[in-house]
Image (cartoon, rainbow, N blue to C red):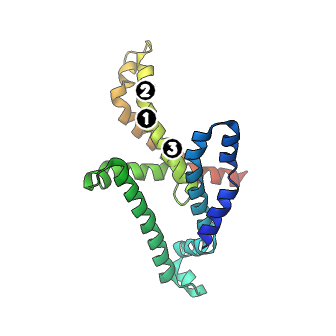
Amino acid sequence: MVLFKFVMEASQHSRLTEHLRTAGDIELADIIDPHAHRYTGCNDGARAGPGHIIEVIRENGFRAEAIGYEVASYRMLANIVAAVFAALAGALLAVWIKYTGPATTLSLEIMTDVLLMVVVGGMGTMYGAVIGVSVFILMQNYLQDLMRMAATTQLPVPLLSELLSPDRWLFWLGVLFVASVYFFPSGIVGSLRTWSRKD
């Protein structure tokens, strides 16, 4: 009920899509609008009463039980909600690629990609998931093109053009991820939150 209330409020006050519609970009507004409502509803639902209780249980289950919360019930609720979202995501994936099986859902490559997205964006936040996916997809799609452009420029360093070969894009992707974990140990969003608290 709380989640539905927040989704309805978000649909009435969607500033981004309203701005896009007045600017004349109706197709982009039609694409962004439903996703923005879902994101806002999930984010606000996580901040509502049950979301706070689940966060307390995550931090210290024994203490939450000592306060009087029914830890088992809230853990079951969290697992049910997670299972519903996973089932919806799986159904959408099956409709999108018209096939589902272990190769499309349980492969090591997909699991590694998801892990890298979470590590780069930051765990425990909705913003971290969105930023992690965006950074990963941008790097995956455009890093090879950037390296191709860098390799075609004739630089006086003899090994640099070989090192920047587009065939080595996975190596540089790994280097960028190791650097992001080194410089942003709690993900991009977590590091930004830490830096903003210091100021």
Name which residue lies at 59% across and 66% down.
46
Q: Amino acid at mark 2?
A: Asp
Q: Mark 2 = which residue?
A: 145
User: Few, some or many C-alpha atoms within 10 Å of disc 2 (few <14, some 14-19, many ≥20)?
Assistant: some
Q: Secondary structure at mark 3?
A: helix
Q: Which circle's residue, 3 or 1, is located before the other in the chain?
A: 3
Residue 195 - label: none
Q: Which circle's residue, 3 or 2, is located before the other in the chain?
A: 3
Instruction: Measure the C-alpha gap from mark 2 to mark 1.
Output: 8 Å
Q: Is residue 27 above or below residue 65?
A: above
Q: Amino acid at mark 3?
A: Ser
Name which residue lies at 33% across and 28% down.
167
Residue 134 - label: 3
View extreme (left): residue: 102
Name which residue lies at 45% across and 26% down.
146
Whole-percent x and y of residue 132?
Answer: 50, 48
Q: Mark 1 = which residue?
A: 141
Q: Quadrant of the N terminus?
A: bottom right
Q: Quadrant of residue 175?
A: top left
Instruction: Measure the C-alpha gap from mark 3 to mark 1.
Output: 11 Å
Q: Is residue 157 above or below residue 174?
A: above
Q: Amino acid at mark 1?
A: Asn
Nearer to us in this view, 119 or 128: 128
Name which residue lies at 46% across and 78% down.
76
Q: Quadrant of residue 67?
A: bottom right
